[in-house]
Amino acid sequence: MSADNLLTLDGVHTHIAAYHILHGVDLAVPRGQVTMLLGRNGAGKTTTLRTIMGLWRASRGSVRFAGQDIGQWPTPRIAELGIAYVPENMGIFADLTVKENLLLAARGARTAQQIDGARLQWIFSLFPAVEKFWNHPAGKLSGGQKQMLAVSRAIVEPRELLIVDEPSKGLAPAIIHNMIEAFAQLKAQGVTILLVEQNLSFAERLGDRVAVMDNGRVVHAGAMRALAEDAALQHALLGLAL
Ligand SMILES: Nc1ncnc2c1ncn2[C@@H]1O[C@H](COP(=O)(O)OP(=O)(O)O)[C@@H](O)[C@H]1O
Ligand SMILES: [Mg+2]
């Protein structure tokens, strides 16, 4: 079982200043699959992602990636393992152009010509707005276009694990469709994906596995399909109207 999990959290506790936020998070992210992390506002989803990335430190428990305990590693070293993280605020530089934002995310490239051309064309096909606004300041993009740019930055080079915090937040349906298609294509290329999501229909369309958090713990983990087909369980875990 554990051999198939690219990322595993065991009994992770995280404190932020004097606040005890995570209370023993157990989470398994199977290799090559899409895992959805759901839960009410304030459940601890973002804190879990930040703990994985070393932006907060677990005070107890372990974070393991490909068999290594990365719990005390600095964030840049964690990223170098091939983990891309798109935070809730998307981490875009508003004063830089779309192109410059993308170049900054490409470790090996100084000019657009140095980015793998086929990969860039593929990104343009997934997210046409990135090509359309290539030389525009990123701050002028709409919320949905910024999210496209943020995901483009995360995938400008091949990654083993992609972690995105609320990719569909505030997006129009047509853009949500683009996002789902992008993640589906990444999965088809073998990328392992962990997404925080509030939108259950988005989660159902992409997720293989699901973990639901409440009060700083994972309170349910299983197949996405089983949760999708069980309205009573959704209601119990997420408080959704039946
Ligand atoms: N920087 C912080 N300082 C103090 N409390 C925080 C901080 N960040 C998050 N929290 C608290 O931790 C809890 C979990 O937050 P978060 O992980 O952002 O939840 P979610 O992403 O599931 O909405 C919430 O009660 C939130 O108020
Ligand atoms: Mg959050």
Image (spheres, rainbow, N blue to C red):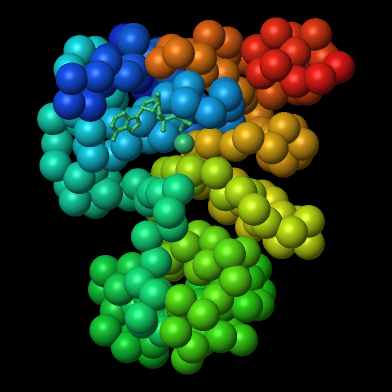
Image quadrant holding the C terminus, namely top right
- Residue 225 picture location, percent across and down: 75, 22
Would you place residue 144 above or below residue 233 in this image?
Answer: below
Number of numbered discs: 0
Q: In this view, does 62 lie to the left or right of 205?
A: left
Please indicate, yes or no, whether residue 62 appears anywhere in the rendered image: no
Tell me where residue 67 appears, x and y as whole percent. Answer: 28, 25
Left or right side of 124 for 108:
left
Q: In which quarter of the image is ligand 1?
A: top left
Closer-to-camera residue (41/119): 41
Residue 182 figure quarter:
bottom right
Q: In this view, does 230 lie to the left or right of 41?
A: right
Kindly identify the residue that appears in the image at 60 percent across and 71 percent down: 142
Residue 199 at x, y percent in the picture: 69, 37
Residue under the point 20% across and 13% down: 60
What residue do we see at 37% from left, 22% from top?
8
Q: Position of residue 105 (x, y in %)?
A: 33, 68
Tell which of 53 and 14 is nearer to you.
14
- Quarter of the image holding residue 110? bottom left
Residue that appears at 70% across and 16% down: 239
Residue 205 in the figure: left or right of residue 182: right
Q: Which residue lies furthest to the right in this view?
A: 242
Residue 221 in sight: yes
Quarter of the image where one finds residue 132: bottom right
- Between 229 and 215, the one lying in front of the other is 215
